[in-house]
Amino acid sequence: MAAPRHILDGYKVLDFTQYIAGPTATRIMAGMGAEIVKIEIAPAGDRTRELPFIKEGRSGYYIQQNIGKKSICVDIKNPTAVAVLKELIPKVDVLVENFAPGVIARMGFDYATVKALNPKIVMCSISTFGQQGPLSNLQGYDFIAQAYSGITSMIGEADGPPYFPTAALGDVSTGVHAALAIVSALLHR
């Protein structure tokens, strides 16, 4: 009897994501069988390695968001590291990033460059306020998007300030939608 297959077995993903929205998308894809190679930027790597809960020197948060992924840490300012990443791009199906708009291009991995290296690649760029438009140049996190969307006006005391949101509703939802969009693009391809 053959071993069970997952729907994304055989697919490879370069994961330039951190914190919640991007890692949620690639975590879902890892669960679906994709091989995820997480690219961590030196010198610090993924900053969530430092978030509590820390046990035996490991962040539970980092483990939760990156379970099933491989990881390498590279100095993106080193031409040798950039060359290594450019050698990986033709070998993957997907590149996912969630930097502020323009950051991935400054690293040398904008869509035009990536597509020239791998014409069949699917690329997903996740940002709080989109890739273009009046707010796109702003960095953001889930709680900022919740404030802009009006969610925070619905939590807290009636005559008081809003409470700090305790769940990353937008980030997790964005990650799920990004995973669905990526799988749809792979199916279309």
Image (spheres, rainbow, N blue to C red):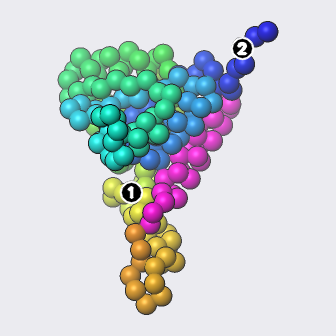
User: Looking at the picture, which amino acid does disc 2 mark?
Assistant: Ala
Instruction: Give the quadrant of residue 15.
Output: top left
Q: Is residue 139 above or below residue 2?
A: below
SS label for mark 2 = loop
Check the image and report above or below for 88 versus 7: above
50 or 86: nearer the eye?
Answer: 50
Query: For the magenta stretch, what is the residue range?
Result: 165-189
Give the label, 1 or 2, closer to the camera. 2
User: In the rendered view, would you say 137 is above or below 104?
Assistant: below
Q: Position of residue 144 (x, y in %)?
A: 39, 64
Q: Position of residue 61 (x, y in %)?
A: 41, 43
Residue 22 located left or right of residue 186: left
Residue at the bottom extreme?
Answer: 159
Q: Secondary structure at mark 1?
A: loop
Return the x and y of residue 13 as percentages of the image width and height: 50, 26
Q: Nearer the viewer, residue 119 or 81?
A: 81
Q: Is residue 2 left or right of residue 24?
A: right
Query: Residue at label 1?
Result: 141
